[in-house]
């Protein structure tokens, strides 16, 4: 996992705490840019949204007044600026940096325009543009609704009629735990809770409809960090083979071109480039080894259930006088077989 500094501040360390916090404050983003780490897509039909950073007084503007001024100060906020109308057009900006299971997601928003529609919302447990949950507020009709999109079709919405003032900041919040969601608007819950079993985990993001012009700020996700399968495999393997001197898994993360260390007994190695040796093993399924002072390292391919090479295991063992290449590989082989037995596909390593 990579932490996005400036734009995203994370409290706590991966896999060492029971809760973490992501803050999307956009303070490190330039006006006119689309925030890094996000992906624009459209639910339904039509063109994607125009997601950019703009400057606005923001929520709680009185707290950020420059010294000696009486007019509200401004700061970067996220805006959806496209005014293209479409009855089935729902622009979404999805955060690609993490997948969440149980969490609390809250965001401040302001609807500033739109002729056909005047809406803003959030999405969560999103799989793609055809499968996700939506919590949205409608300033034109005065209501707040929750619904699911499953295979591109919306379920009947549930929620309350509430005044949603135009050009004013409001808050949407969802608390997701298992199949129960507590949704609220400006601190007021939409009933007791909502139950839905469709999606157990997914991504979060921002949502609008049709030609709605909407601003977003102060988005926060509080969640329980998950251990990727690769990290779990490393821990379990070290328990089974405690005499190993080191262990590492390298693979190419989704959306990237070069392999990197995705799990290791040394946390400092995570995210480092895999190098030419790893790239060659991924391409050809070869085996490498090297001798050190008092130790020896074996690089071996890790295969999925179809026999395809999806990762590389780096096994560090103690060496002894008279040890041969054949013997070294024979010692490393059961370790790698134990590791790859839990891999159905490359995707498993990152989940």
Image (tube, rainbow, N blue to C red):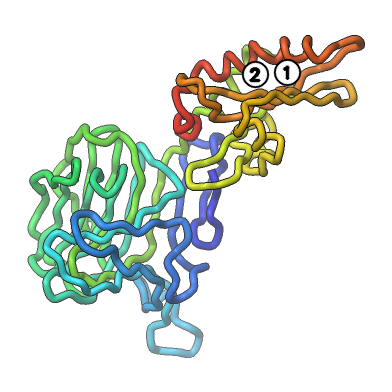
In this rendering, the answer to whether 113 lies above or below 305 is below
Callouts 1 and 2 close, C-beta under 8 Å:
yes
Q: Residue at x 39, y 76 (%)?
A: 54
Q: Quadrant of residue 273?
A: top right
Q: Which residue is mark 1?
A: 244
Q: Which quadrant does the C terminus fall into? A: top left
Answer left or right for 266 relative to 252. right
| 283, 63: nearer the viewer | 283
The percent position of residue 336, horizontal first and vertical second, equals 62, 17
Q: Residue at x 23, y 41 (%)?
A: 181
| 255, 155: nearer the viewer | 255
Answer left or right for 189 relative to 39. left
The percent position of residue 210, horizontal first and vertical second, equals 18, 66
Q: Secondary structure at mark 2?
A: helix
The percent position of residue 161, horizontal first and vertical second, equals 8, 58
Q: Which residue is mark 2?
A: 238
Q: Secondary structure at mark 1?
A: loop
Answer left or right for 110 relative to 88. right
CA distance for labels 1 and 2? 7 Å
Q: Residue at x 36, y 54 (%)?
A: 94
Q: Residue at x 62, y 30 (%)?
A: 284
| 117, 152: nearer the viewer | 152
For residue 268, say whether it is visible. no
In this rendering, the answer to whether 313 lies above or below 32 is above
């Amino acid at each position: 996992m990579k932490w996005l500094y400036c734009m995203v501040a994370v409290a706590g360390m991966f896999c060492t705490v029971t809760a973490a916090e992501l803050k999307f404050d956009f303070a490190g983003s330039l006006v006119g840019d689309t925030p890094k780490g996000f992906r624009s897509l459209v639910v339904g039909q039509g063109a994607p949204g125009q997601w950019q950073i703009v400057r606005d007084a923001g929520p709680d503007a009185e707290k950020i007044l420059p010294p000696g001024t009486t007019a509200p100060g401004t700061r970067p906020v996220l805006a959806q600026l496209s005014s293209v109308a479409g009855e089935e057009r729902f622009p979404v900006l999805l955060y690609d940096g993490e997948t969440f299971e149980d969490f609390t997601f809250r965001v401040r928003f302001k609807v500033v325009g739109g002729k056909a529609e005047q809406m803003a919302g959030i999405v969560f447990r999103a799989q793609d543009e055809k499968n996700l949950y939506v919590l949205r507020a409608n300033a034109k009709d005065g209501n707040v609704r929750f619904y699911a999109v499953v295979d591109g079709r919306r379920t009947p919405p549930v929620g309350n009629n509430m005044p949603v003032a135009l050009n004013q900041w409001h808050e949407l919040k969802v608390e997701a735990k298992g199949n129960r969601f507590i949704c609220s608007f400006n601190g007021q819950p939409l009933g007791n809770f909502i139950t839905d079993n469709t999606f157990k985990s997914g991504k979060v993001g921002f949502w609008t409809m049709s030609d709605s012009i909407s601003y977003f700020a102060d988005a926060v996700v509080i969640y329980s960090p998950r251990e990727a399968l690769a990290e779990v495999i490393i821990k379990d393997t070290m328990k089974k083979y405690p005499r190993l001197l080191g262990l590492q898994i390298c693979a190419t993360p989704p959306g990237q071109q070069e392999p990197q260390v995705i799990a290791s007994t040394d946390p400092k190695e995570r995210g480092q480039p895999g190098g030419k040796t790893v790239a060659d093993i991924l391409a050809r399924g070869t085996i490498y080894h090297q001798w050190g002072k008092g130790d020896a390292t074996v690089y071996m391919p890790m295969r999925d259930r179809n026999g395809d090479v999806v990762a590389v295991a780096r096994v560090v063992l103690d060496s002894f006088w008279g040890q041969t290449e054949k013997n070294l590989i024979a010692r490393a082989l059961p370790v790698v077989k134990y590791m790859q037995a839990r891999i159905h596909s490359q995707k498993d390593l990152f989940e």
